[in-house]
Structures are given as C-alpha cells and as structure tokens.
Image (spheres, rainbow, N blue to C red):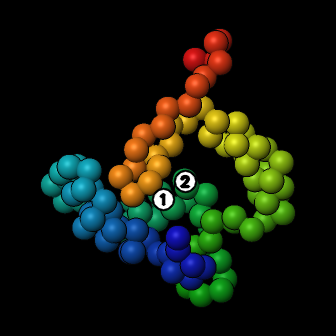
C-alpha cells in the first residue's frame, strides 16, 4: 500500500522494470519509460494533485468510493468467500467448501 505522496511515475517505472516484470518473467529490451508509467497511473485512476509536484492519489477515500465498497463490493466478496477454498493451520491444509448444486 502506497501512502499519499509516495507514488510517482519514476517509482512505478523503477518497480516495474526492476522487480515486477522480472518476477513475472517478462523480458523487455528497454523496459517501460517514465512517460509510459505516467500514462499507466492515469489509466489506473490515479491523478496528480497540488499537494506536491509529481504526487498521485487514487481517490480511495472519496465518499462515492467508500459507499460502493460498503454497499456493493464487500457484500459481493462475502458471497464469493463462501465458495473459495481456505487454508488452515501452520501446514496450510486446504479446505474445499461444499458448493450447493447449481452454483458451480
């Protein structure tokens, strides 16, 4: 989780080229440019603010976002969790839920 003021195109470019792409076995000849990282931040919903030059925020605390999370997203996730496998104990034993007929 990034704090407000910690996200910049340069940091995204460095993380993608130095860590994320190699871990995903994505080999780019030159990596992505800082300009591409800038546009990816915008596509991901981040916007530059006037707090400090080059700072981006994702808007996760806006009233409409909080309302959506509380009234839609979290309720949907709770329903999905009932259908998900869980892992228990230090040995992480997999527990498969019993899914009612017709919900496969």
Crowding near the residue tagged with mark 2, few <14, some 14–19, many ≥20 C-alpha atoms within 10 Å: few
Q: Residue at x 63, y 65 (%)?
A: 58
Q: Residue at x 79, y 60 (%)?
A: 66
Which quadrant of the view contains residue 48? bottom right
Please name whichever residue, 2 or 12, is drawn nearer the observer in this view of the structure.
2
In the picture of the structure, the residue carrying the numbered disc 2 is 43
In the picture of the structure, the residue carrying the numbered disc 1 is 39
Q: Which structural element holds mark 2?
A: helix
- Against 88, residue 6 (above or below) is below
In the image, is 43 to the left or to the right of 12? right
Q: Are marks 2 and 1 in contact (CB under 8 Å)?
A: yes
- Give the percent coordinates (x, y) of residue 57: 62, 71
Which quadrant of the view contains residue 29? bottom left
Q: Residue at x 46, y 46 (%)?
A: 87
- Against 30, residue 88 (above or below) is above
Please name whichever residue, 79 or 39, is drawn nearer the observer in this view of the structure.
79
Q: Residue at x 56, y 31 (%)?
A: 97
- Give the percent coordinates (x, y) of residue 75: 76, 43
């Amino acid at each position: 989780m990034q704090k407000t003021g910690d996200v910049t195109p340069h940091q995204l470019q460095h993380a993608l080229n130095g860590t994320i792409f190699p871990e995903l076995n994505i080999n780019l000849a030159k990596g992505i440019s800082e300009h591409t990282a800038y546009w990816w931040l915008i596509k991901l919903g981040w916007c530059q603010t006037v707090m400090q030059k080059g700072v981006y925020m994702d808007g996760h605390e806006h009233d409409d976002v909080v309302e959506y999370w509380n009234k839609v997203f979290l309720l949907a996730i709770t329903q999905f969790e009932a259908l998900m496998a869980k892992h228990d104990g230090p040995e992480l034993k997999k527990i498969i839920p019993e899914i009612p007929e017709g919900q496969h």
